[in-house]
Structures are given as C-alpha cells and as structure tokens.
Amino acid sequence: MFVMNRLLFISYFTLSLIALFHGISCAQTCSATSCHQAIITADKPHAPVQAQECLSCHRQKKPNHPLLGDKSWELVAKVPMLCDQCHKPFGSKKVMHSPVKEGDCLACHKPHGGTGRFLLGVGEDRTELCVSCHNPETFKQPFMHGPVAVGACNKCHEPHESKEKALLDAPVRVVCLKCHSDFANELKKAKATHPPVKEGPCTACHNPHGSTVSKILKQKIPDLCVGCHDKIGKKLAAAKVPHKPLSQAGGCSSCHSAHYSDNKRLLPFDEMTTCLSCHGTDNLGTPPLRNIKKDLEEKKFLHGPIKKGECVPCHDPHGSDNFRMLRGNYPAEIYVPYKEGIYSACLGCHEKNLLRFAETTIYTKFRNGKRNLHYVHVVNSRKSRSCRVCHQAHASNGEKLIDKEVMKFGVWNIPVNLTISSSGGRCAPGCHQAFTYDREKPVLYKTYSSSRKN
Amino acid sequence: MSSYTGTLKRVCYASVICLLLAGCAQDTSCKYIAKEPIFFPPAPDEPRIQYLTGINSSDDVAIVKKKAGISLFVTGEDKANTVVTLGKAYGIEVHKGKIYIAQGLEKRISIIDLAKGTITEPAGVTSPRGKLAYPINLTLDDDDNLYVADTTRRDIVVYDAKGNFKTSFGKGIDPKSKITDVKFYKGKLFALDMGTHLVRLLDRTTGEQLAEFGYSDKPAQRLALPGNFTIDPEGNLFITNLGSNKVVKLDQDGNYLDSFGGVGDQFGQFSKPKGIAVDNEKQIYVVDGATSVVQLFNDKFRTLTYFGWPGLAFGSLNSPTGITVSTENIDYFQKFAAPGFKITSLIYVVSQFGQEFCIPRISVYGFGQMEKK
C-alpha cells in the first residue's frame, strides 16, 4: 500500500513537471513559431513582449494549444487590474478620460506593441486615434489650432486623468501661454489689457481646436464682441449711419486691439492718430471723405475736442443716426427750416440757450446790442443757415473757427471776411453787404426791425 | 417784644421758604439743541439734513466764560450785554460769516456775529433817514453795503460797510410798486416788485432803473405776486410767486427759462411759497409758509426731500419765511452735528411764529451726509 502511494505521488509529480516545462517550453516557442510574429515584431513592443515574458500577462488554462473552438490561454487578470500589476493605477485626479474610467486601457493602447510611443497604434499624429471617439468635425475646420492640425492632442491634454476640466494638463491660460510665451511677455508690459485677456481663459473668445472663423475665434467679429458689449451691439444693429470698418473684414479689430494696447480703449495708437490712419488720406470712400489730416495741418485754431486729441466727443465711432455719425442732430444741408433740436450736435457742448431768445446779453457775444445775431441767422422757419455756413467744424486759421472762406456754395467758396473787435465785429460775407455789430453801442441798420419775429 | 420776635421769626421762615421754592422752580427757558439727532429724511433713509440748533436771542450765540465760578455772557470787551431777542422776522442772509436778519415789526436789522457772540444793528437805523419802517428782505454787495427792502417805506434803504445810512431809492418807480426782495449779483442789483409783478434791475449807486422784466404774453411764464427770489451761481433768477404758487426761473435778461410747482400740499406743490435758496450743487430750497416745510429739489426740479414739518421735538418750523444756504460758519456749527455727520453747507430758515412752543426765530440745519466707513 505504501509503495502504491509512493508510485502515485511520483507519477503526479512527474506529470506536473512535464506540464510546467511544457508551458515554459510553449511560451518560449510563442515567438519561435510563425503564429505570433506580428506581436513580437511591433515597432514599439510592450516591455514584457520584448523580454518574451508572455507569462507576465497570460497563463495556459488548457494543455493543448492551439485549441480548436476554445481558448487554451487566458489573461492572468482582467484589464485594468492586469495593467496595474506594472503600471500605477489611475483614479487620484478629479477628471478622468472615459476609457480610463471604464478601465478600458485597450481602447487606446496596443497591449503587445504599437506603431508609436506609449503602445499607441498611431504615430505622433494622434488624430486617427482620438477621432475614433471624438467628433471628427472638430478637426476639419478651415482654421485649425497648430497642435490640433498635426494631431498633437497631448500638447494640451492629459490622456488619462487631470485636475483640470477637459483633461487639460494645467489651467486654460497656463496651457495657452506656455506656448504663446511671447504673447505672455508682451501682455505683462501692456498698459491696457482687455479684461477677458487679463483674467479670463483664452477660450472665452477662441476655439482651442478649430473654427470657421479666422484666428480660431468662436464667432465672427463683431458678433463675438457684442456678446459682451451688448449696448454697442444694439447700436450697431440700429445705426442709420454706420461706421464702415465695422462691417468690413477686420470689424472691431479695425480700430481696437483684442488683447492689449498702450492706449486707452485698446486703440493701437492715441485716438486722433487712430482715426487719421484712415481719415487722413485723399481717397477714403466713394466719393472720398475729407482728408481731415489736411484740414488740421498748420491751422491756428482747433475745435475744443480736437485740441485735446479727441474725435469721439462729437462723432460716435460705432455709428449713429446722425449725419457723419455725430452724436446729435446736424443737418447735412446748409439751409433747413429751423426747429428746436436740429443743432443738438453743437449745442450739446455750446450754450444751450444760444438760439432760444431773439434778444440776450448773456448767451452770445455775436450780438448787436441785445439783438442775438445767431438767432437772426439760424432761427428761420424757412431758411435756417447751418452752423457750417460760417464755422469750420474742425480747425481754422480764423477766430471762432471762421476762415476767410468757409463754405463751398456750388463751385464758389463763399468768403466770410469776419473781423472781431473788442465789443463786436464786422462781417462782409458773400451772402450780404458788410455789417458791423457792437454789443455796447448797437449799430442801427436801416433794415433792422425791433420786432422779435423772424 | 415777644410779638416782634415772633414776627421776625415768621419773616425769616417765609424768606427761607421762598428762596427754597425759587431754587426748586423749573427752568422754563427754551433749549434749541436736540438731545438725539433729528435727521431728514428720517430713518431708515440715509440722513442728508440734520437740525443743528436754533437762534432766538443773543443768549444762543453768546460766548460763555466762567469767572470766579460764575458764568458771564461776555463780549469782546468782557462785559455783560443786554440780551437781544429776535423779533418777528422775515428775510435772512449770511455775508462774510455774519448772519443778517430782517425783523419787520421791530423795524430793525439784526447782525449776528458768531465769532464775537453778539447781536447788533447797523448804526444807521437810528438816523432819521435810515430809520426803517418794515424791513422784509435784504442783501449785501461786494463792498459790504447793505440793501434793505422796506415794504412800508416802499423803497430800498442802503447802509454802508460800517452800518451808516448811505442812501435810499426805489420810491416812486411806479405807483403800484412794492419792493419785497433785493439781491445783488456780480455788480448788479435786482429788486423784486410784488406790486407790479416785475423784476427791476437798478443801478446800485443811484437807484436808477436799468431794466425791468417779468411780464410775458404767456400767462404761465409771467410773474404773479412774486414775493421772494434768489440768484443761482450761474446768474439765473428763481422767483416764488404767491399768485401762481409756482417757482419761475428767468435769466438775467428776463427771458423765461422754466418753472415748476403749482397749488397743493403734495411733493412739488406749494400752498404759500415764500423764501427760496439755491446751493452750490444747484439744489433748490423752497419754503412753504402754509405747510411749514422746506422742500428740496434738484436742478431738474425733482423733489429730493423735505424738512421742518410741525410736531417734531426739535427742528420744526412755524410759518417759515426767509431762507439762505451758506458754506460759511460750518466749523462753528459742526459741533452740533451727530458724530460722523459731515456738514457741507448750512441752511438757515426763519420762523415767524412759534416761539412760545420753543421754535426759534432762526433754525439752523446742516446739509451733508454720514461719513462712509
């Protein structure tokens, strides 16, 4: 009996050894045969494969291999526990890539080896791999972000897990500025920064992958801008006299820098220089607008705002309902029937009661005694003379913005010939005979009526 | 002997009792300083005006010094003055720190000097030609000449900087003329004539009329029983009209600029508009003599608040008339303000009646706000 047991033990022991060495022998022969050549000849093999340690991951469960209709080998553990044997498990960060969360390492990685690094089945251009799950349209936009165009998704995104949303490897601004470092340097030096650029993520305006809009903006300009600047948006939509650059290719960026500037309101230059960069030529528009730069050159007297280098006190750069985008009414014609408010563009700054009373000692120095000569010229129910009949809007060589010749009347530049004295003056314009006026000793005109009617 | 002694004893006892009773008698004089701050508007709104104190007599402004344990009301000459109590008053002005108040029934102008703690009169009021009959309103020019509108004399009496009578004019301008107010502005003397519903521009030296205005073809734009007026820093005239219960705004040429008000007792309405003042922020103060309040408006004539209504522990008005707003003397009155309430201007309002209810002739309010923490 004792001998029988000993014989049985020896038999079992021998058979186990045979099975073990058979397995080892088989393992050693996985790569020696032609069956698994593709695995071992991958461009970038998995380390255990390279070391021919198939048993790290696989174990034989049935003696015969190959086995028709069944598997004779199995994984020593399920993925991802299998992978965790060597690789540090994930799950310590807030945001996980879905396949990682589901433990599906093989969604991206080739377990035996890949054509690219990290056991991926793609090279450095990972587009094909990523669009196998992600929307491919993102990667087919007319304007693409550089890394996206070359499939370098990993330049911005962590493939497994991250503390940041969208698996970014850092906060949005940090991710952007680590490449756009030249921009970051300039931003630090800028005197004025667009608030979203100063504090917010770049993705407030830019699509980080691609867009149908140049500069990978989320929307075209001005739609993008008026998303925040809604009041300007309403004005743009409603303005009867729009500012043309806003409807052209550059839109808002025709005048404003989107990111930073050394000037107020993110203008590229000071206000006057910015405006004159367009309005300082002879061929702007059809028919051409006035060359304002020429109008101002070497002139002795400048209109108040212009002296300060400002155009916007009078003109709304975003458009308005008024002639020449003025902020108030100002007739385009030289003669209009007068009614209250038609010169609000001027009287917004100048004496509001200038045209209110036929007689005054207060509201104007252009008077003969108390007779208000502005009222005489302008407040006419049939033929009000616009301010521009006498006054230049921007600059002049004469006092009170009145030049020797001011208004173009058809082919004739009408002379004004104003001379000013200490208590009055004299006008000898092309409109009427010469008249003198005196505030202190009013001149008696033959045609003057003491009536207050027009 | 015993009866004499007994009588003497009785007299002594009675004297002691009388003295004791006198010592126990209650002090019935008015106090014009509130123990708790009186703010307008009241809580929970943010306070902008505080009632500070009142001036009814020289006791209220005297500088009190203690000498040998006894309080003395002293002047600069360090002797006690007769107490001067203000009479039924109307117009009030502040000029170079001094408060000038016209008292018709007393036929006098009182000059309150806070720095010296005195109330005096111009010396010229005692002169035959300078004697007043019923002074109602007054103004001072840049040479410190005092112009007083007197409705009984029906002229304007002028005193020089030293208080001596200088001249008078305005009588006989018009048979119906009744000058009720005068104002000086940048070299020009304006007189308000209630009798003819006009403003008259007079030469301040000769009294010659240079211009008159106030009439309009449009009834809504003309003056109607104009009683008081003021001139704002821009030179515009604000005139209260008893006939229309409106405030009419004219420029110095007499052109109608705007108006507001109307009869009633609601915000923006008046029952008896009297004195009017405009401060440096163009806020308009209008006294209503019937409802005994002062309404405050902004330069667009929007009602901001009101103050002085009857029934308050302190700060009520009674048939108020004159008003003036000044940035002088703030340091003097700041001590009456609640902690943290910073005064930017002072409002002086005259009450014609109510002294028996301890309403002072002049109520002083501070316009300002609580300091931001």
Image: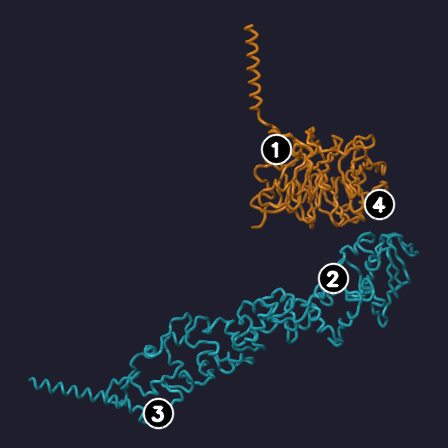
Q: CA distance from mark 1 to mark 4?
A: 47 Å
To the question of a shared chain for discs 1 and 4, the answer is: yes
Query: Which chain does the residue under circle 4 lie in?
Result: B
Q: Mark 3 near mark 1, Cβ–Cβ under 8 Å? A: no
For chain B, the rendered hue is orange
Q: Quadrant of residue A221?
A: bottom right
Colour treatment of the image: by chain
Q: How many marks?
A: 4
Query: Does residue A125 appear left or right of residue B225 in this picture?
Result: left
Q: Residue at x 12, y 86 (%)?
A: A8
- Residue under label 2: A345
- Whole-percent x, y for residue B68 in the image: 61, 29
For chain A, the rendered hue is cyan
Q: Mark 1 near mark 4, Cβ–Cβ under 8 Å? A: no
- Residue under label 1: B31
Give the answer, above or below, for where B356 lies relative to A101: above
Q: Is residue A386 visible?
A: no
Q: CA distance from mark 3 to mark 2?
A: 87 Å
Which residue is situated farthest in the front direction here? B68
Which residue is situated farthest in the top direction here? B1
- Residue under label 3: A37
- Whole-percent x, y for residue A74 in the image: 29, 83
Q: Give the residue type at disc 1.
A: Lys
Q: CA distance from mark 4 to mark 2?
A: 34 Å
To the question of a shared chain for discs 3 and 2, the answer is: yes
Query: Which chain does the residue under circle 1 lie in?
Result: B
